[in-house]
Every structure is written in C-alpha cells, then in structure tokens.
Amino acid sequence: MKRVLLFGSLAPPDVMRDIPDASEAANRFQLDMSRGLVRSGVRRVTAITAITIATVPHPRRVFVHGAEWDLGDGIDIVAPGFVNLFPVKPASVHARLKSAGMRLEGSFDAVLAFSPTPIGHASAGLAVARKAGVPFVCITADYVPELRPRSLFRAVEQKLATRVVRGSDGLVVVSGHTPRDMSTDQPWIKIDGGVADDWERLPEVRPRVKTVVFAGTPDRMRGAPLLLDAFARIEDADMRVVFAGRGGMQDAIAAAAARDPRIEVKGFLSREEFRALLASATVLVNPRPSSAQENRHNFPAKLLDYLASGRPVVTTLAGDLDPVYVEVTMPLYDETPEALAVLLREVCSWDEARRVAFGRRGRAFVLRERTWDRQAARIGDFLGQLAG
C-alpha cells in the first residue's frame, strides 16, 4: 500500500509527556503500530490526530492550535486545531479532522481509526473513507459496547460509537468478546498490541529484592485496590510495592504510602525509567479484575512490557487472553486479596535463578510472537484484503 491514514490521538512522545490527560499506552500503540506498518510494506502512515486534552474548564486552553510533525521513517502527523469547549468539542474535532483528511483525497489506500471513542476521531475517518471509496477499519481499543452510560452525553457517544463500529468495513479488536457481543457481520482480526523495539535489549539494572511493581494508571479498573488490599496482608517488613503511573487513585495510594513506608509511589516515568523499573522488579503484577465490564473488552497492554522485561508476572485472566499466557505467567484464578498475597509471597520466595528462568520463557514468547512487526503485518494484510 502507498499510504494509510490513521485517525486517532497520536502525538510525538515528547509532546505527549507534557499532556496530563494523555494515555501513554494508547500513544505507544498508535506509534508502534504505525512503525510496524511501514516496515511491513506501507510506504507512509499519516496520522490525522486531535491532541488529547481535557475539556474546559479543567485545563487552560479553550482553543487548541494545530501542528504538524514529521517523525521520519515514513510517519507524519497532522493535528488540526479545534475548539476545546464542551459540548462543542466533539463536533469541532470531527469537522477539523474530516477537513484535513479530505485535503488528502486520492493519495491514500485505506483508513484506520484508533478506537470509536471519543466522538469526533473515528467518525471523521469514516466520512473520509466513504468519500474516497477506500476501506475503513476501526480498532476497537478501549471500546466497551455494553457499558451503561453515566450521562446523556455518554449515551449519545455510545450510540454514535456503535454506529461507527457497525459502519466499518472491518475491525481490529483486542478482545474477541467485542464483535461476538455485538453480533457484527464485518470481518475482524484480533491482536494483543505488540512489543516495542526497545525491548530487544534489556536495561542494565540489578533486580531489587522482594519488590512488587505495578505500572500503569492506578485505578479500580486496573486493580489498584486489589493490590493495596493484598499488600496490607503481607507482614514481611522487607517486601515493598512500587506504583508507577498517574491519574486514577494516585492520591489514595500516596495516602497509603504515608501510612506504610513499604509503599513507593513513582508517578509518571519516562520510557527509559519505565523499562528500568520493570527489569528491576522481583515480580510484576497485573491485577485487573475480571468482573469489570471494561476489562472484558480490552487487553492489558502493559502485560507485554512485563513479559518482555524478563521478570516473573502475576496476572488475572481478565478479558480475552489467549491460553498461552497461562503458560508464561503466574495466573491469579481467585481474584481476592488473600490469594494475591499468597502468589506474591511465593514468587518473592524463589531464588533468583528460578525467577530468571521463569521470566525468560515469557520474554522469549512475546519477542517471538507479539512483536509490532508481526502484528502490524497482519493488519496490513487485512487492509490489503479489504482493498482487494
């Protein structure tokens, strides 16, 4: 393919770090997928993007100015300006992204959209694809079709998102539950995200003794309360838990750290700091509860980073994890604080040689089967089939 348009929220990593509302995981997904598409044969990926920023009155800017970046290696970003004022923002984002895409008519072969929400991004991509007569494929990351709307706006957003999903020519899903629960007729492929290139070499750090690491947004959906409750049941004075990430229950975790010196709060980390932290852990934990409806339809992207770090991983089986993950992790079948505490103590009691051997199995698996080159090639083939 000559060119693929990606409608979403991609921003250069250095810009994204300065935006408190941006999702580092979502940005890495879009960036690494774009790089993989180029390496698999797409000549250029142009991201038509709206910079992720909360709606006024929370931040300072009512008008977000446009920008353009050429990231090299066949990837560029066009970020039109928009009105950052509720409830005008979704319509403004849709109109500006659509206009930017229309100006490129005739010079692209397919349109991808990263997630049908928030409203404005994917809907613009669908309109541009229909006008150009090229395939439109929606990536249903972070999309929860059965979630009960909390407000009238969320209900409208949910309805419009469903229309975008059903109006697509194909779906790229991170959970097979999404197309099955929606009973959609479109063809679809399932991917788990991918391992970034920087994991080909491990950071040169020494593992810390009896250190449990949680990396990501510390909130209920990602299991932060479960980990806090489990750690409170561990009386070992030498064990510690490190929370890295921003948002969610950050204040509650900081308050817990003030009461228990074994709890360490890192906040937002650079990519290099993040990788070094994972590689230094005794055990990494992904405690996402299976009972959360959101977790049924997503994939824990950090799980791939965890495994790539070569350290043992304790994880729930929330969502639509392939059975192979049971073989390369310590699965938490009983999602209770008591059971999680037992698993964490068990892994911390292993000698380091056993932890290294266990971690190498998971690392070998993701570097063989879950690289972005491999995943993006599947997406590229899927786009080619639809275009053909």
Image (cartoon, helix red, strand yellow):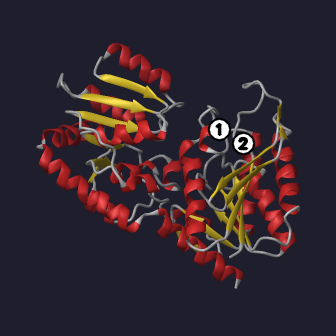
Tags 1 and 2 touching, CB below 8 Å:
yes
Position of 212 with respect to 166 (left or right) is left
**Circle 1 residues within 10 Å: few <14, some 14–19, many ≥20:** few
Q: Residue at x 66, y 49 (%)?
A: 10
Q: Residue at x 76, y 41 (%)?
A: 152
Residue bearing mark 2: 51
Position of 316 with respect to 355 (left or right) is right
Q: Position of residue 273 (x, y in %)?
A: 42, 36
Q: Amino acid at mark 2?
A: Ile
Q: Secondary structure at mark 2?
A: loop
Residue 387 drawn above or below residue 94: below
Q: Is residue 179 at least partly visible in the picture?
A: no
Which tag, 1 or 2, sits closer to the chain's start? 1
Q: Secondary structure at mark 1?
A: helix
Residue 200 drawn above or below residue 239: below
Q: Quadrant of residue 129?
A: bottom right
Q: Is residue 276 at least partly visible in the picture?
A: yes
Q: Residue at x 28, y 51 (%)?
A: 310
Residue bearing mark 1: 15
Q: Position of residue 86 (x, y in %)?
A: 82, 34
- Position of the C terminus by quadrant: bottom right
Residue 139 drawn above or below residue 301: below
Total marks in image: 2
Q: Amino acid at mark 1?
A: Val
